[in-house]
Structures are given as structure tokens and as C-alpha cells.
Amino acid sequence: MIDVVTDLTEDAFLGGQLLLKQKRSGHRAGHDAILLAAATEARDGDHVVDLGAGIGTAGLALARRAGGINLCLVEIDPELAALARANAAANAIVADVIVLDVTADAQAFAGVGLLPDSADCVLMNPPFNDPARHRGSPDQARHTAHVATDETLQAWVHAARRILRSNGVLTLIWRADGIADVLAALSRGFGSLSVLPVHGEVGRPAIRVLVRAVKGGRAPTRLLPGLMLNDESRVPKKEVRNILEGRAVLPLAEP
């Protein structure tokens, strides 16, 4: 339960289409979650699961665009899960919010209704900072939300693979220098990969990768043209503003 004295902010996403409350300190929702939503294809009636949902940003942004999905938000932190539940209600979005560790076993997932082969779509923004190169925050919640262990990616992909139906789609975001780890994690059970590099600045290496993978897919992997967030003047590009404000989607989300 959220303490009524918790210091919260209310922030606008998707150009004001989505208003979300979040804690002023600790992990803060940002561009990664909105890009993830914009990279996710979902249709009316799809059972969509957002693993590690936090306050619900990515899943709720997807639901705002793709009305009619059956959304489930999975979050390990009870306080963040309570915020996700409140945010869904405040934005008139129907969502089932579940407090669960993504690395839990199949029995724990089934116990909260997440059965094997039941989801059409999974999206996830796992903790991805390398502990060897990233100084973790003393705030434990922020540390958990940001810093990966050696098993994080494999465990999260395994959970997604278990609950996805055959030909179901996983969309994830990860740091760009960890692309080899992403491909390795997806090598079991997934195929038909599409990879979108995301660059922060012109002439600089990619900082993120967005990846779409199909359970049981057999098509060749596609490396898409990179998305440049800012122009030479470090001003967000118009196409990026359209994506962040909910007026456009990324190629990964296009049928």
C-alpha cells in the first residue's frame, strides 16, 4: 500500500494523453518505456503482458494506442504495483496488476493466472545496466530497477517464452552494447528477429536496441535502419517527437 505522505509527481506522457503518478525519487519512467510501447504490435483482443511494469508506463502507453487489449502488468515491487494500479484507473484503462518476481517459476506464474502458452504479446524493459561498469544506486528499489545480474536477461526471456503462445511476439529494450547477450538469450525458442538500434546523437554509437522476436519464428533476422533521437544540434527530431507524443509508431510495431 502506498503511504499517503509519499512524495509523488504527476507527469504527462504521449503528449498529455497519459498522466502517470510516480515517486519523485528512485526509478523514474522515461523515453525507454515509451519507445518500447511504440515498438510493440498489439491488436484488439490480444492478451498482452508487461513484465517488470514499474508504474505501468509502457503497458499503459500501449493500451492507450491499441484499445481493446487485455493488459496484465507484472511488477515485483508492491508499492510500484499499487501506483500502476492507480495509474490505470486514473486513465480509465482496464489492467490486471500482479505483484510477482519475473524470475519466479512456472507454478508461481500459473498461480496468478499467467499460464503457459497464454499470451499473444509480451513487452519488457528489464534492468540492463552492467554491474561491472555501472555504480548502483544506494536506493535499493532504484538499484533493482536498473542493474542486471548475469542471469537477468536469460531469466526474463525464459519467462516470456513460457507464457507466450506459439507465434506470440516478445518486444524488449536493452542497452546496445549488450546485443550479443540479447541474441544469445533469444536463440532458444525465438526467431524472426527484428533489431532496431537507437542512437542518442549523430555520429555516436547506438545506446539502445529494440528487439522484436517471434516464439517459434523461422524468418531471417532483420537489422533495421537506426533511430536517431536528436539532430546535429541535439534537438529531438520531429519523427521522434511524434513517437514520444503518441502520433506515430516504430517500424517494429507495423504489421
Image: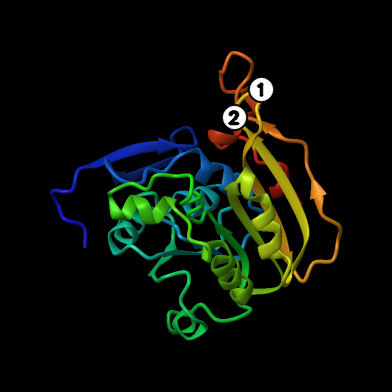
Residue 185 relative to residue 4: left or right: right
| Residue that label 2 marks | 200
Badge 2: few (under 14), some or many (20 or more) residues near its Cα, within 10 Å?
some
**Pointers 2 and 1 in contact (CB under 8 A)?**
no
What is the x, y in percent for residue 126?
51, 56
Badge 1: few (under 14), some or many (20 or more) residues near its Cα, within 10 Å?
some
Quadrant of res 248: top right
Residue drawn 63% across and 52% down? 40
Secondary element at tag 2: loop
Residue 151 relative to residue 85: left or right: right
Q: What is the quadrant of the N terminus in the image?
A: bottom left
Amino acid identity at mark 1? Val
Q: Nearer the viewer, residue 64 or 233?
A: 233
Residue drawn 39% across and 44% down? 135
What is the x, y in percent for residue 137?
33, 46
What is the x, y in percent for residue 154?
59, 67
Residue 21 relative to residue 242: left or right: left
Seen as rendered, the residue at the extreme front is 132
Q: Is residue 96 above or below residue 17?
A: below
Amino acid identity at mark 2? Gly
| Residue that label 1 marks | 202
Q: Nearer the viewer, residue 135 or 33?
A: 135
Secondary element at tag 1: loop
Residue drawn 56% across and 72% down? 159
